[in-house]
Image (cartoon, grey):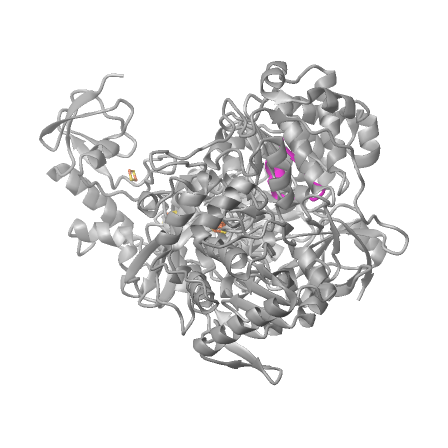
Amino acid sequence: MEEITLSLNGSKVTGRPGITILDLAQQNGIHIPTLCHDPHLTPVGACRVCLVENEATGALLASCVTPIAPGMVINTESPKALEARRTVVELLLASHPDSCIICDKGNRCQLRKIASDLEIGQVRFSKTRHYYPIEDTNPFLERDLSKCILCGKCIRGCQELQGAGAIDYAYRGFDSKPATSLEVPLEQSSCEFCGLCVSLCPTGALSEKMRKYKGRETKRVRTICPFCGCGCGIYLELRDQEVIGVSADAENPVNRISLCVKGRYGYDFINHEDRLKKPLIRKNGKLEEASWEEALDLVASKLEQIRGESGADSIACLSSAKSTNEENYLLQKFTRAVIRTNNIDHCARLCHSVTVAGLATSFGSGAMTNSIAEIEDADVILITGSNTTETHPIIALRVRRAVMKGAKLIVIDPRKIDIIKYATLWLRQNPGTDVAWLNGLMHIIIEEGLWDKDYVETRTEKFEALRETVKKYTPDFVEAISGIPEDRLREAAHIYASGERATILFAMGITQHTTGTDNVKSIANLAMLCGNVGIESGGVNPLRGQNNVQGACDMGALPNLLPGYQGVSDEKAVKRFEEAWGKKLPTNPGLTVVEMMRAAEEGKIRAMYIMGENPMISDPDLKHVEAALKKLDFLVVQDIFLTETAQLAHVVLPSVTFAEKEGTFTNTERMVQRIREAIEPIGEAKPDWQIICQLASRMGYEMNYEHPSQIMEEIAKLTPIYGGIYYDRLEKEGLQWPCPNREHPGTRYLHKDRFTRGLGLFQAVEYIPPAETPDEDYPYILSTGRVLYHYHTGSMTRRCQGLAEIYPEALAEINPSDARDLGVEDGEMVRIASRRGEVEVKAKVTERAPKGVVFMNFHFNEAAVNMLTNPALDPVGKIPEYKVCAVRVEKA
Amino acid sequence: MSRAIDLSKLDPILTRHEGQKEALISVLQEVQGEFGYVPEEAIERIADALKLFPSQIYGVVTFYAQFYLTPRGRNSIRACRGTACHVRGARSVLRAVEQTLGIKEGETTDDLKFSLETVACLGTCFLAPVMMVNRRYYGKLVPHRVENILKQCD
Ligand code: SF4
Ligand code: SF4
Ligand code: SF4
Ligand code: FES
Ligand code: FES
């Protein structure tokens, strides 16, 4: 298309057809004030503050909505335009309270700034003000609608970007205002406290409660959110050494201007008084403060002593999906080269180990095949075993937007989770029957000839075996197992098979089963059957939980894999590492998390080194975990708080949060992103990487790095998929692996034209029931998971005031009809018992839980659901069956 | 005041308009036709059926004066307080209505017999002060006539 030429403030300029006058001005470095405009929202042209004059006609035009046209003579500063703008602003001010001096928006207020730019002092109009009560009953935002100028940005943001639709204009004319349905307080509406509306609001009508009286930030540091695997870009806003707020990094492609409530308001754990500030050593049964010298000397000598007595394999290390790539790399290097065992693992074992195992055999690579942004352009989305809205909020936004654009969404989940609101079809399977319905879908797709024959022929192998296996999974056979009615299963098969770009999103609902690997393989089978792997916006997408769980796996914090998924018994790889590290490496695979605990209980593991993990809450069957940890001769815990696990330690080493160190996190879409030091370490705490280096040198192995970038250089040399990842390339934005060399731009989606392993491998699997099914004594199924407002074992989020206030206690979701049978009312305490233990917890009676199933989150130590869970393992991935165990429920 | 309402009466209306965002106004009219007002409890259901947000429904309900969120009386009284009526004593007429029925403007009597609202001008200023009961105008009003007029309603 031809460029349009016109005159702008006296110079001749050109622009693409379709852009607005405002766009053109911005491209030419000319500032026009705006109030209702935001580039991420639909333009409405409501406020008229952006008026400019077309001197060719004398017309005043709202520049944010007027497209450029040939022959326009635009003057953004003509006397007429300025006068009109002044009138508009004065009218706004006339109905605005005079409270600028005490308003928390301060000089971030756009209205105030524009007024002063236009040199407006006295307002010519008589004041007609609205008095509304200030609404601040929720912990996060304060609404003072007397300052509202009705720009509608909050409404558009909430509807268009967040998809929550908590607010809309209510009433008319002078009485008009943004309101929730029935004007209930936000916390009773569909508001998710993402804080987007506050960040968009040009005035003090919406403000951040936690920022009150904190003053203006003195510095902003660009970094990455420390909570979930979405990996949102954020700015930490600082006042000296205190983090006083968080804002979204709009340049980050993951989240742009959106964040979830944890990312936006979960920052006060950083400066929390509970932070560990000095090393602790257990003396006479009590943990007492000690110097770093003493603590590290003790750790080094104890580990050496135990290795001397019982061999290296009597020591085990847990790495952390919260720590950086560099730190995970160093801890596995320390474990392998200094302690000389492969006994290293981390919590990925408990979430996606079966994904890594399953997808690696099917495709040759065990990560999300596609990118987060691509989800928006899928035409069919199948979500199963992922409560996306709560666990991956920013990915859920992409799903919502895809649906708004016309995509069909199928949700297959036993719980009535939020994303179902957007679904074309929701199937409620019996927990633990995933292979059955997946085989059922494939049965229908093959029977009706809906599969992609070309793709199967040219890109895959072993299809015949799959066809044989799924033969017996007729819809009525599947219905008997899964409870999914035949016609609904057919409908799902038709929708999925009709997609040009169908993507499957899954998470722990698929993996945390004794058949986890089979579940994952079946998902891979389904996607390949319809030709959906290796294409944009399609694929098989395991949503990884922790901020850096992908990275911790990539870095080889796994007992059978070196960095970059190179086997510990792969001779060539081992040789390369041995040369680089100058040490002979063990080649027998080490123990996994749950196996370590068992070995500890049996006395075979005598010492453990735990970095940033909290197995005393997160691992299954806590009674045994506690027994195991207590049995250890030596337990070192390196963490930011005195967690439940640290309380059992012999030595506690204080480490720092993401805000106090440099490094990289790899998000769920394989994107390696930089985190940056914003404040100095609190107390004497140190970054994990420094602690490991100091310990290694005490044990006779020098690790000399001045900066994590040097560690990344070493990683790049030894890890082909990270081969091109260097800090200088990460300054502006992240890079997605595989990125084999310095010139490589990174990979947005995997398996294009060719699978990593060559041909995609169909792996036919049969349905096997869960390890523990309900019986007379334990008639209910217990399933576990997370909630929006908390993270993992709660050690961080429960120390965030707002998050703790809005979701203060554990809740067990129980179906209303079960509640009736049990005589339990909403809010009453129930006792839930399994063969392994019991807990008391408040009941939440809700349709979300299916009949016969109780759902609990694992964030609260007071009602530690893992007292109940079954440590039965998937035979390949060694993941425990968190999602199904049999329990008894009674009124407490 | 809570009244048991039979939300199943919504079903036929909502099934007819399943997924039709643009039909919101007519859905609200039908709902109001059915219940006499738009019950709060219906908002969520309408939102679900039309794939809109509840706040959007509330926005439209509050935007148009024709929609009510509270039950309406069988008889609707509209007392004028336009300028012409005002100068001829509309206020005392309104007060008489309020006293007779024990409700304020915008309210409905407990027995659901009357709803009272005020309007800016009924367009019959020559009859000022005026009030309308249902479709009937009562002009040149004096306070003591009010009770009698209201008595005739059932
Ligand atoms: S916080 Fe988020 S969800 Fe709540 S009203 Fe604002 S934009 Fe909507
Ligand atoms: S609350 Fe703020 S963002 Fe929302 S309409 Fe009012 S001024 Fe605009
Ligand atoms: S979605 Fe995840 S990464 Fe993004 S702000 Fe929320 S917790 Fe942080
Ligand atoms: S910014 Fe253009 S009309 Fe509001
Ligand atoms: S002012 Fe009352 S009818 Fe016109």
Q: Which residues are magenta?
A: A410-424
Q: Is residue A80 left or right of residue A747?
A: left
Quadrant in the picture for residue A491: top right
Q: Quadrant of the N terminus of chain A?
A: top left
Name the residue located 63 percent from the left edge and 60 percent from the top edge: A313
Q: Is residue A750 left or right of residue A880?
A: left
* In the rendered image, the vertical position of residue A845 relative to residue A603, given as above or below: above
Name the residue located 23 percent from the left edge and 43 percent from the top edge: A33
Q: Is residue A411 magenta?
A: yes
Name the residue located 62 percent from the left edge and 16 percent from the top edge: A457
Residue B71 visible from this viewpoint: no
Q: Is residue A295 left or right of residue A83?
A: right
Residue A2 position, x and y percent, is 23, 17
A375 and A625: which is toward the camera = A625
Q: Is residue A593 magenta?
A: no
Residue A289 visible from this viewpoint: yes
A529 and A517: which is toward the camera = A517
* In the rendered image, the vertical position of residue A66 relative to residue A191, given as above or below: above
Q: Quadrant of the C terminus of chain A?
A: bottom right
Quadrant in the picture for residue A255: top left
